[in-house]
Image: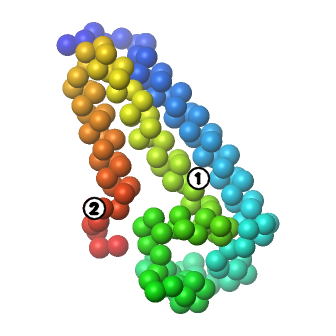
Amino acid sequence: MSEITKEATQEQLLYAAILEKGMFAGLGLMFVTFALYVFGILEPVIPLDQVSAYWNMPVGDYLAAMNNNFLNQAHAPTGWAWMSMLGKGDFLNFLPVAILSGVTIVCYLAIVPGLFARGDKAMGIICVATALILILAASGIVAGGGH
């Protein structure tokens, strides 16, 4: 068992550095994409003057109404379907959220080599497993909860 210290390990510092850069990138992109949406530079799927009419709807009803009233697709967009609509101002705002959500996966994968190099195999395996679980959850392959 390793000795407990008050100093951060190289892996902790690397994780924090990547997390900080990813957070600032996602936050900066969030400001940019929101400005593109609010100032009408990119046309949204739902016009801004009609957005408040949809606020009180459950997600399923909102998606169905959005599809019926604006998109007219065979099926309402779910999962990663928003990526096909990144040219629309309201869907472009999902991109920084996805980046902010995915930074943790990058952090875990970045520290794995250092963990194995210093002989901390258990933590390396936990980090790989955690990253794989997060990737699987984000993929939409496994669905649950009835939503």
Mark 1 or mark 2, earlier in chain: 1
Query: Which image quarter is the C terminus in?
Result: bottom left
What residue is disc 1 on? 96
**Quarter where residue 40 is shown:** bottom right
Q: Residue at x 65, y 67 (%)?
A: 87
Q: In which image quadrant can residue 143 be found?
A: bottom left
Q: Amino acid at mark 1?
A: Pro
Total numbered badges shown on the rendered structure: 2
Horizontal side of 44 relative to 14 (left or right) equals: right
Residue 113 drawn above or below residue 103: above
Element type where label 1 sits in the image: helix
Residue 88 seen: yes
Amino acid under disc 2: Val
Gap between marks 1 and 2, in whole Å? 23 Å
Q: Which mark is residue 142?
A: 2
Residue 61 in sight from this viewpoint: no
| Residue drawn at point x = 36 percent, y = 20 percent | 114
Please, what secondary structure does the residue beneath circle 2 have? Answer: loop
Residue 22: percent from left, percent from top: 56, 39
Q: Mark 1 near mark 2, Cβ–Cβ under 8 Å?
A: no
Measured as percent of width and height from the top left, residue 2 is found at 25, 12
Vertical arrangement, residue 114 with respect to residue 52, above or below: above
Is residue 13 toward the left or the right of residue 35 in the image?
left
Q: Position of residue 23 (x, y in %)?
A: 57, 40
